[in-house]
Amino acid sequence: QLVESGGGLVQAGGSLRLSCAASGRTFSSYVMGWFRQAPGKEREFVAAMRSGGIAYYGDSVKGRFTISRDNAKNTVYLQMNSLKPEDTAVYYCAARVSGSVWQGSAYEYWGQGTQVTVSS
């Protein structure tokens, strides 16, 4: 089970940190990812991190967002800085055993999502 937290309302230029707490199994060896979906838009890859610490980012968030993980806490984080109104979406945490990080359909486990709203 994956449970996201940390979403909310923030002004443009502000920051938020999302957390994804995993339970029921140890996800330290899994690929952990963040995706987002805005109303009327397709789900978008945001960031992912392999168990060894290699991180990947979508083009729209590079340089502004940072993914990290604390395997001892079975938790993954998404630090979001310099937020823009176009970052407004429901953000989902996901996990998969291995393989490509980019395709949401390949992830086996998903959280319920947390809303992030960025006002202009």
Image: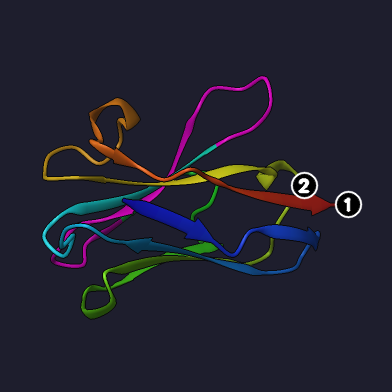
Q: Quick one: which residue is furthest to the right in this view?
A: 120
Amino acid tagged 1:
Ser
Check disc 1 and report its element: helix, strand or loop.
loop
Residue closest to the eye, 2 or 13:
2
4 is higher (above) or lower (below) than 42: below
On residue 120, which mark appears?
Answer: 1
Q: Quick one: which residue is furthest to the bottom in this view?
A: 72
**Relative image position of residue 44 (x, y in whole percent):** 48, 33
Check disc 2 and report its element: helix, strand or loop.
helix
Residue closest to the eye, 111 or 100:
111
**Relative image position of residue 56 (x, y in whole percent):** 32, 52
- How far is the residue under mark 2 from the one under mark 1? 6 Å
101 is higher (above) or lower (below) than 32: above
Amino acid tagged 2:
Pro
Q: Residue visible at 26% across and 69% down?
A: 74
Display colour scheme: rainbow
Q: Tell whether label 1 touches label 2 (CB within 8 Å).
A: yes
Q: Is residue 102 shown left or right of residue 66? A: left
On residue 85, which mark appears?
Answer: 2
Q: Is residue 24 shown left or right of residue 79? A: left
Q: Is residue 57 visible?
A: no
Q: Residue visible at 48% across and 56% down?
A: 4
Q: Earlier in the sequence, mark 2 or mark 1?
A: 2
Q: Residue visible at 25% across and 41% down?
A: 101
Q: Is residue 50 shown left or right of residue 81? A: left
Q: Which residues are magenta?
A: 37-55
